[in-house]
Image (cartoon, rainbow, N blue to C red):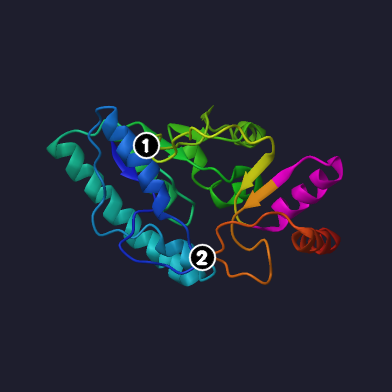
Amino acid sequence: IFLCCFQSERNYPGASYRHWRENFKPPLEAMGHQVIEPKGLDFAAPIAHRSDSRWIRRYREVTSENLVRQVKEAHRRQGVDLFLSYFYSIHVFPDAISEIGRLGIPTVNFFCDNVREFHSVSELVDRYTLNWVPEREACKLYDRRGAAYVALPMAANAALYKTSSTEEIPQVTFIGSADGLRTRLMAEVFPSGLPMKVYGGNWSTHEPATTTKQTISSRVKKIISRRRKSL
């Protein structure tokens, strides 16, 4: 399996991407697959430069050419049974995916922000053999494009996310950083009176982005209320 999932040797402030490799590669290897990774390609870089269209175009040109060359070399040397990626459109040009497919290699792209950002991957979806879609609400977006897809849950490394032996906690728990959509959804849930806790960054304007745990308090409720009014 030739795997591309935000591998990078650099650290980009404010960008979360290293966990994808941890959730893809070890489980695939544990199942007996040999995983091939690209060399010298920085798949986290375009996320940090996505607002610079000129930079992105040049990056896509260089990365597309380099990636296709490496896949061809790997396929010639040992054979590649599957090309598995987590790509946005800013990573490569669509023709790069088509060229890999013409080698006889099935291509699959995982993308987990379809509901909010389908536009960020739409340029690529019809070039893949199959698209891995975790959100069932997003399936209709692929249907409209005539792109093949399979609806499956998000990948997770069971060795990293073990269930604890503690008692079940009777509450609704959300894990993720704050953004407009999530704060709007939280604001809709609060009136129900359900016991709830939120873990993640940016839920309080008085805490840094690296905050790892924030219980929803009166202060956070006020933040959500303000954001809801602004939406």
Tag 1 residue: 159
Name the secondary structure under disc 1: loop
Using a 10 Å C-alpha cutoff, classify the residue at mark 2 as few (fewer than 14 neighbours), some (14 to 19) or many (20 or more): some
Q: For residue 35, what is the image quadrant?
A: top left
Residue interval drawn in magenta: 178-196
* N-term mark: 2 or 1: 2
Mark number, residue 72: none
Q: Is residue 12 magenta?
A: no
Secondary structure mostly seen in the magenta stretch: helix
Q: What residue do we see at 49% from left, 34% from top?
A: 132
Residue 70, how many percent across, how many down? 23, 49
Using a 10 Å C-alpha cutoff, classify the residue at mark 1 as few (fewer than 14 neighbours), some (14 to 19) or many (20 or more): few
Q: What residue do we see at 60% from left, 51% from top?
A: 176
As drawn, is 132 to the left or to the right of 41?
right
As drawn, is 40 to the left or to the right of 114?
left
Q: Is residue 23 above or below residue 230?
A: above
Mark number, residue 50: 2
Residue 155, how many percent across, how many down? 45, 36
Name the one closer to the observer, 28 or 90. 28
Name the one closer to the observer, 231 or 194. 194
